[in-house]
Amino acid sequence: MLTVLLATRNRGTLLQAVLESFCALRSPDDAWKLVVVDNGSNDQTQTVVASFTSLLPLQVLTEKKRGKNFALNAGIGQIEGDLTVLTDDDVFPRKDWLQQLRRAADSHPEYSLFGGRIVPRWEIAPPSWTRWVNQGAAYAATDPAWKEGPIAANCVWGPNMAVRSAVFQSGVRFDTAIGPKGTNYVQGGDTEFTRRLEREGYRAWHVPEAVVEHFVRKEQLSKTWVMGRAIRHGRGEFRLGQINELDSRKVLLGAPRYLYRKLYSEGRKLVKGWVFREEEEMDRAHWNFNYVRGQIQEARAIHSERKTDGRAS
């Protein structure tokens, strides 16, 4: 027995198509159930989900506290079976998805985290400039070169993640201070979770045959959206991986000084690309510039938090 868990909010139309794809899933030998947590939707989500109650092994919950991780934590209490599969409300699985994750979990009992392959499902044809975009950071698309086998836990991502249920039964939960929560949030809720598990000794396994398609909306194919994503990515990476630099490096205006030097360097590249009309070089520099902006923004926010509670250096 395994449980699939997903949170949703105000994506009724897309969720309709997603749940239709779930109806085509091939069941693993030991059966499965689907837990959908409605995170306070005010569109047609509840009607859409209700229409699938006779078509899927479905359980529906409501969590009104805003935030994906609040919703996932609410759903953990409804898990049944030894394996929990996590995904998103904009993900379309291949028919054998659950079978492949089940196979991997049964074949590798010494591993507790399993990540499948994630490929983009474009709403419209992507423009040519997206070839330079970091597909993982922007669209949560995994590298097709990754082979089956052990992998760093931070390469297991939310759209296609399986966790042994014993992990949750031990009391582990998602951090509600990070991850999707409105439009202005720190990116990296899944990464915080998997890195924490890795520090506690849990190991991860990549399952490239367990494939899902992650829907990429047309508005996500604008440079404005992508550059905003770079800022959120930088914020998340600083909070998750560089926060100790506030203690170990010299700080200026609440952020490590070297980040301002990096910002200046990328700014020069950005200007150079604009002057010489080298569009791709300019775009790459803009992404890097915004990524560093995000790091500085998060560093200053953390520094401010520490000042408030008396821990600032």
Image (cartoon, rainbow, N blue to C red):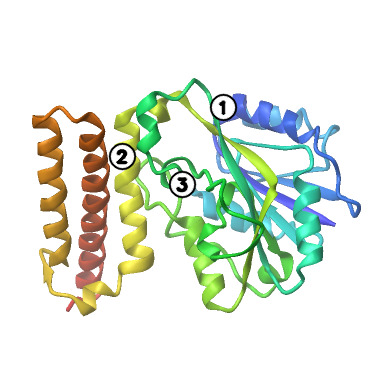
The answer to whether residue 118 is above or below residue 241 is above
Along the viewing direction, whichever of 306 and 243 lies nearer the viewer: 243
Along the viewing direction, whichever of 101 and 178 lies nearer the viewer: 101
Circle 3 crowding by C-alpha within 10 Å: few under 14, some 14–19, many from 20: some
Q: Secondary structure at mark 3?
A: helix
Query: In the image, residue 112 lies at what x, y percent?
Result: 68, 68
Q: Amino acid at mark 1?
A: Asp
173 left or right of 282 in image: right
Which residue is labeled 3 in the image? 136
Q: Residue at x 27, y 42 (%)?
A: 287
Q: Secondary structure at mark 1?
A: loop
Q: How many marks do you count on the picture?
A: 3
Which label's residue is closer to the chain start, 1 or 3?
A: 1
The quarter holding residue 245 reads bottom left
Which residue is labeled 1 in the image? 43
Circle 1 crowding by C-alpha within 10 Å: few under 14, some 14–19, many from 20: few
Along the viewing direction, whichever of 168 and 159 lies nearer the viewer: 159
Q: Nearer the viewer, mark 1 or mark 2?
A: 2
Q: Residue at x 44, y 55 (%)?
A: 188
In the rendered view of the protein, which quadrant contains the C terminus?
bottom left
Q: Amino acid at mark 2?
A: Gly
Which residue is labeled 2 in the image? 228
- Could you tell me how far apart the alpha carbons at marks 3 and 2 are, in whole angstroms? 15 Å
- Could you tell me how far apart the alpha carbons at marks 1 and 2 are, in whole angstroms? 26 Å
Query: In the image, residue 4 lies at what x, y percent?
Result: 73, 49
The answer to whether residue 162 is above or below residue 99 is below
